[in-house]
Image (cartoon, rainbow, N blue to C red):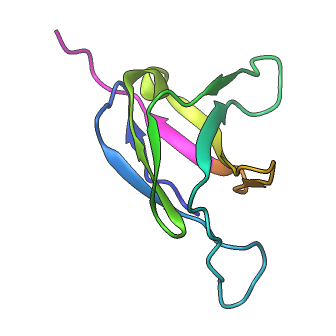
Amino acid sequence: MALPELVQNEKGRVITISWYKDHTQPPESETITGATITGKIETGPGPEFSSRLISGALVVSATNQHTWTLHYDDTYVDGDFLAQFRAVFSGGKELFTIPTPLKVIRSVEWP
């Protein structure tokens, strides 16, 4: 899974994320139908470490895909981060994406 570069303070953009089983060649789809999706954004290790939940809407949109509609809280800080998503199913099964680099590029000031 790769994420596009985002712009600081960006909101409303919809990103589609596909789920695949780890280490299968060719990649095999992971079914997430019926799951509740959550996500986290965190800084890398070190003294400035921070972690926050993704605020934008996360909605299953296909058998192996979900969408992320960006919210201001997801992009208000520029920098390099890791993003990870979790799918939780009734019955307790949980799936996780591999933590993926997320870059938020600094924006100029707007009134």
Name the residue: 66% across, 90% down. 26
Where residue 45 appears, x then y in whole percent? 82, 31
Q: Give the quarter of the image for residue 83.
A: top right
Residue ranking furthest to the left: 111
Q: Which residues are magenta?
A: 101-111
Q: Which of 59 and 72 lies nearest the eye of the viewer?
A: 59
Question: Is 9 colored magenta in this rendering?
Answer: no
Q: Is residue 20 above or below residue 79?
A: below
For residue 33, which quarter of the picture? bottom right
- Give how far across and how far down residue 70 sits, in percent: 38, 36
Number of numbered markers: 0
Say if 70 sits above or below 86 in the image: above
Q: Give residue 39's quadrant in the image.
A: top right
Judged left or right of residue 52, residue 24 is: right
Magenta highlight on residue 109: yes
**Residue 105, percent across and down?**
42, 35
Left or right, 94 with respect to 65, comes to: right
Residue at x 59% of width, y 37% of height: 80
Viewer-nearest residue: 46 or 12: 12
Image quadrant holding the N terminus, namely bottom right
Residue at horizontal 58%, vertical 56%? 34
